[in-house]
Image (spheres, helix red, strand yellow):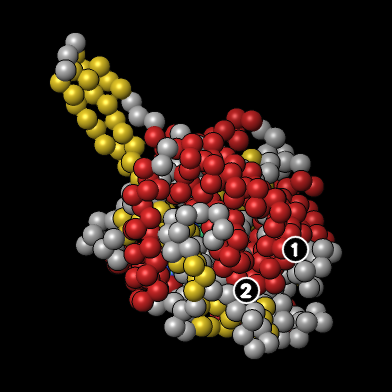
């Protein structure tokens, strides 16, 4: 503890260490500083890379089943600490406890088990008989030091989705959590310090343009994986261009959720609101279905249902299990969302509910960053609020009249992360799965992201996806007998 608030430290070389500087971390529900986290810079980046580099030979030489043993220990640890980590994360980033405790954290024990089971995949190669006396074979090898940069909206889940697979493949890892919400990952680091040999897993918190950039540029970092915004993906591409580093990017989105008249409208109304752009972390999820495309024949009916569902949402303390929608993560993000509410007005979008008046909602928690659920309508998918990621509880409904028009509007986006289709027509469902420019398509469901299926995007939403093989490279050998 430092003064009144807890202080979290970096994990470097198996030690919990202070950085030269610290920064505040704020509870977004109240606006209060509740902890201090390291504001790491070039020195800490250098130390983390040195530790990871030193640990690489032994970790990568370990038989795959040996690495699996360590990953299973992490899985067991999640079994014991899930509730503590869920509460911490909710306090830190405002994601409602209903989600962190009931959905996110329970899945982590399974994810680390799955990664443990995949350690062998990372060392499987092919044998090709090239002739009676000539044998070809392939080897999969880890890159070396892998840097995993994560956002603030689901820190422990994103940490796990990257670190588990990178470690399974035999890389040593440095995780850089986001400056807005690092506490749950740093606490996890305290627990993991007891699990891995020193230097195998390192965690350094700090600003993206400081420690993040220093890690990306470091000559001994062989692989970079980012989950974050498109702008950060572009900055990392530029910073790593000279060294031609292999990159994995899971980036932003502006996902369409398309509702046809033959859909189960109860399920569709729930799907486009509750599990998507509103209760889904107050819209702060990459796959938020922030464009709701509605067939004109069911326009009034569906919008009425959405309105009724949103009127019943409970905006309150995210640590209360009765709360169904939490705050915006930070003052900066709050201002960004508000600016889009102004943009919507200027662009002439029609407000159905929420809007600027709802951006000051302070439900008994003065000082927090609250925006009420907001819905606009427009006929023009070219508006900025239809093209740009807002990352808040703000959706736009757009009418369509034919399958062709729905598809054209859906694909008219710089992004291609996810899409939802609500229909009972099997042929239409398959045609949209085929034709939507999107990394994931959900049919009659939304935001199911089971580990084991690829999750990534196309266009400005990135390329590649976290998996064991993504953290390996292939070598060929030709052997003349
Ligand atoms: P962000 O891009 O601002 O930050 C993400 C991470 O990158 C943070 O750790 C940040 O410190 C770091 N960073 C920033 N600039 C950097 C630089 N120049 N060099 C190295 N690191 C740098 O994103 P955010 O605001 O934290 O998160 C929201 C964004 O993340 C949204 O666009 C959202 O769609 C996206 N996201 C995508 C997925 C996905 O799986 N596709 C999941 C969650 C969030």
Residue 97: mark in rendering: 1
Determine if the C-beta at disc 1 is less than 8 A from ligand 1. Answer: no
Q: How many residues crowd around disc 2 within 10 Å: few (fewer than 14), some, or many (20 or more)? A: many
Seen at 76% across and 86% down, the residue is 366
Residue in the foreground of this view, choosing between 167 and 422: 167
Return the residue at label 2.
329
Seen at 76% across and 46% down, the residue is 267
**Outermost residue to the left:** 480
State the quadrant of the N terminus.
Answer: bottom right
Residue 372 at what x, y percent from top left?
A: 72, 73
Q: Is residue 332 above or below residue 398?
A: below
Residue 206 at what x, y percent from top left?
A: 47, 75
Residue in the foreground of this view, choosing between 329 and 128: 128
Q: Is residue 474 visible?
A: yes
Q: Say whether disc 2 or disc 1 marks the residue closer to the N-terminus.
A: 1
State the quadrant of the C terminus.
Answer: top left
Seen at 39% across and 31% down, the residue is 124
Residue in the foreground of this view, choosing between 428 and 180: 180
């Amino acid at each position: 503890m430092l003064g009144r608030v807890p202080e979290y430290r970096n994990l470097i070389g198996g030690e919990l260490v202070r950085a030269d500087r610290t920064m505040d971390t704020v509870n977004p529900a109240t606006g209060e500083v509740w902890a201090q986290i390291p504001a790491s810079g070039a020195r800490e980046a250098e130390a983390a890379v040195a530790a990871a580099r030193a640990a690489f030979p032994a970790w990568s030489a370990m038989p795959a089943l040996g690495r699996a043993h360590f990953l299973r220990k992490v899985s067991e640890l999640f079994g014991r600490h899930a509730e503590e980590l869920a509460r911490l994360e909710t306090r830190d980033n405002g994601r409602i406890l209903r989600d962190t405790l009931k959905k996110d954290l329970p899945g982590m024990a399974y994810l680390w088990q799955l990664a443990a089971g995949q350690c062998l995949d990372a060392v499987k190669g092919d044998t090709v008989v090239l002739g009676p006396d000539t044998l070809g074979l392939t080897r999969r090898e880890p890159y070396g030091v892998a840097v995993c940069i994560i956002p603030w909206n689901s820190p422990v889940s994103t940490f796990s989705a990257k670190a588990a697979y990178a470690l399974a493949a035999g890389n040593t890892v440095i995780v850089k959590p986001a400056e807005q919400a690092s506490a749950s990952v740093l606490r996890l680091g305290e627990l993991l310090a007891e699990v891995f040999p020193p230097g195998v897993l390192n965690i350094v918190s700090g600003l993206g343009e400081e420690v993040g950039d220093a890690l990306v540029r470091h000559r001994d970092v062989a692989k970079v994986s980012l989950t974050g915004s498109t702008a950060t993906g572009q900055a990392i591409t530029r910073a790593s261009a000279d060294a031609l580093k292999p990159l994995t990017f899971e980036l932003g989105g502006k996902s369409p959720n398309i509702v046809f008249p033959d859909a189960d409208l109860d399920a569709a109304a729930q799907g486009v609101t509750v599990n998507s752009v509103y209760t889904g972390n107050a819209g702060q999820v990459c796959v938020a279905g922030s464009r709701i495309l509605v067939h004109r024949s069911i326009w009034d009916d569906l919008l009425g249902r959405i309105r009724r569902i949103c009127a019943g949402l409970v905006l309150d303390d995210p640590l209360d299990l009765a709360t169904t929608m939490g705050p915006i993560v930070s003052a900066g993000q709050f201002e960004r969302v508000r600016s889009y509410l102004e943009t919507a007005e200027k662009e002439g979008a029609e407000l159905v509910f929420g809007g600027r008046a709802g951006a000051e909602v302070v439900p008994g928690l003065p000082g927090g960053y609250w925006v009420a659920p907001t819905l606009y309508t427009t006929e023009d998918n070219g508006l900025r609020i239809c093209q740009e990621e807002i990352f808040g509880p703000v959706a736009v409904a757009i009418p369509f009249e034919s399958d062709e028009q729905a598809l054209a509007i859906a694909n008219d986006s710089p992004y291609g992360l996810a899409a939802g289709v609500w229909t009972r027509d099997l042929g239409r469902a398959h045609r949209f799965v085929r034709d939507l420019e999107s990394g994931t398509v959900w049919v009659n469901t939304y935001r199911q992201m089971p580990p084991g299926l690829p999750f990534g995007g196309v266009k400005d939403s990135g390329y590649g996806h976290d998996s064991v093989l993504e953290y390996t490279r292939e070598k060929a050998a030709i052997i003349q007998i």
